[in-house]
Amino acid sequence: MSSEMYQLIAIILYLATMLFIGWYAFRRTANLTDYMLGGRSLGPAVTALSAGAADMSGWLLMGLPGAIYLNGLVEAWMAIGLTIGAYLNWLIVAPRLRVYTQVTNDSITIPSFLENRLKDKSRFLRIASGIIILIFFTFYVSSGMVAGGKFFLSSFGLDYHVGLVLVSVVVIAYTLFGGFLAVSYTDFVQGLIMFFALLLVPIVGVFWTGGVAETTESIQTVNPDLLNFLSGATFLGVLSSVAWGLGYFGQPHIIVRFMAISSVKEVKSARRIGIGWMLISLFGAVATALVGIAYFYQNPGATLVDPETVFIDLGQIIFHPFVAGIMLAAVLAAVMSTISSQLIVTSSALIEDLYKAVIKTDATDKRYVFLGRMAVLIVALVAMVLAWPNNESILALVAFAWAGFGAAFGPVILLTLYWRKITSKGALWGMVSGAITVMIWGNVKVLTDTLYEIVPGFIICLLVTYFVSLLTYKQNDEIEKEFTETLTMLKKER
């Protein structure tokens, strides 16, 4: 049996498992809350690994190793910033958001939570939130589809567009039918695959490059600055990389997991599992790139066409074809877990936050679930059209969408959870100003080359939200009551 056949069998088994999980979740989905939030029934392990897998995407196995391979450890500042941001997100957002969303009319999406929390009768806040989610997630889903196309091109020599369509069809299938439960369960399995793959590739790879000392020596021969965290770094460059951590507070596909966990008591366990998974996975991604530098230096006959496929190429070189197929499945897992999470949140924004807000209808839950599935299909097709030309790097697409969410929602979520005086007008203007700042800054090359757009976007959103809220604040007894009730419930549940 040829090596490609072994790898293909592994990939087919993986894809079949994802579809089976989608079918299982479909059987457990009865209403819109089940479809959008899994009935708030997730345990700590599923919550933690599904949040991690949804977070990291193809960036973890392709984007980050590619950046490290090209520029060295100076690119690791991004991983450091992300780890700090993820930890703070679990610590200060997760427990309070889980309780507050339940207190405020059992909100099942971020826009509906903001509307219910701030008692916005105009519906402008909910609609603006839904539109922002729709815009940036379409780009985000597109980045995952680009990664899927590159994956099949690099691994099997398939046409980029064939790979793009294949990945898209499978993800659409299990997300469309199984909803949030399918997304969470598949993300859990995908998180495990990614974790073990990122341990195995660098550990076994070091033996192929002669051990740690020999590997280090080879890297230094290529360029000693590759092992220097500050080589070529500027203050604004390091700040831009670390600032990726700010994005966590506003990523709907991640913080929706906090709303779905079964209870606040489970948050601490989930945080430990999630951060442990993240630390080891990020270390594995960085180590994979460094081993790749050493290997391709020591073996000039082996060529690496695209630095973003260093993990894929190493896996195919050093493992038995079937095991290499599992390594390939890890890349697919990273790509597909994020696409599916983003599709379900975008679907919820379209149906729960735009359709229900604009078209006031008393449709049945069955019809809403049907509309949610159609929304998944439409957004996926638009993202496929954007991904079709294959003229954007994965990291560039992810960076733009990540900044958009972090700047638009991050400060608003934090202030909503911790400040009684935030108002709907403050949140609306802050959110819009943050999103617009990212859109303008992110499309002016001289600005993006100087500072990552999330920094000015986050600061402007925070300041606008704060000052507009001060100007428009009027005491609302219902808001005060819910804020106090949240603190009481949080203390009791802890």
Image (cartoon, rainbow, N blue to C red):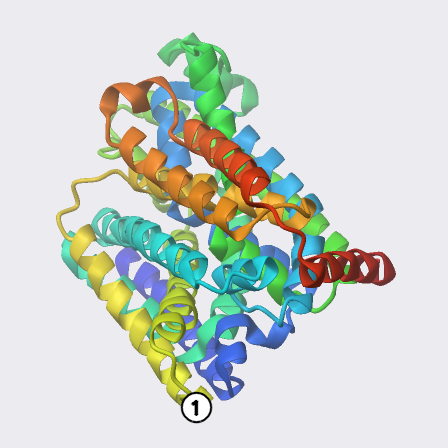
Residue 364: image location, x then y, percent: 43, 90
| Residue 224: quadrant of the picture | top left
> Where does the image place residue 130, in percent across and percent down from the top left?
39, 59
Viewer-side residue, 5 vs 163: 163
Q: Nearer the viewer, residue 322 or 155?
A: 155
For the N terminus, give its image quadrant.
bottom left
Please determine whether, in this image, residue 73 is positioned above or below residue 31: above
Residue 394: x and y in percent read 30, 41
How far across and how far down the image is residue 119, in percent?
Answer: 57, 62
Reading the image, the residue beneath label 1 is 364
Amino acid carrying mark 1 in the image: Thr
Q: Is residue 351 left or right of residue 83?
A: left
- Of residues 306 and 415, the one nearer the viewer is 415
Q: Is residue 471 left or right of residue 490?
A: left
Report whether residue 318 is seen.
no
Quick one: label 1, few (<14), some, or many (20+) residues within 10 Å?
few
Q: Is residue 430 visible?
A: yes
Indicate the quadrant containing the C terminus: top left, top right, bottom left or bottom right.
bottom right
Which residue is outermost to the right? Answer: 492
Residue 38 relative to residue 489: left or right: left
Q: Can you say whether 69 is above or below 30 in the image?
A: above
Q: How many marks?
A: 1
Q: Considering only vertical position in the picture, is 443 above or below 86?
A: above
Task: Identify the residue shown where x is 39% and y is 44%.
Answer: 432
Q: Nearer the viewer, residue 16 or 254?
A: 254
**Numbered disc 1: secondary structure:** loop
To which quarter of the image does residue 357 belong? bottom left
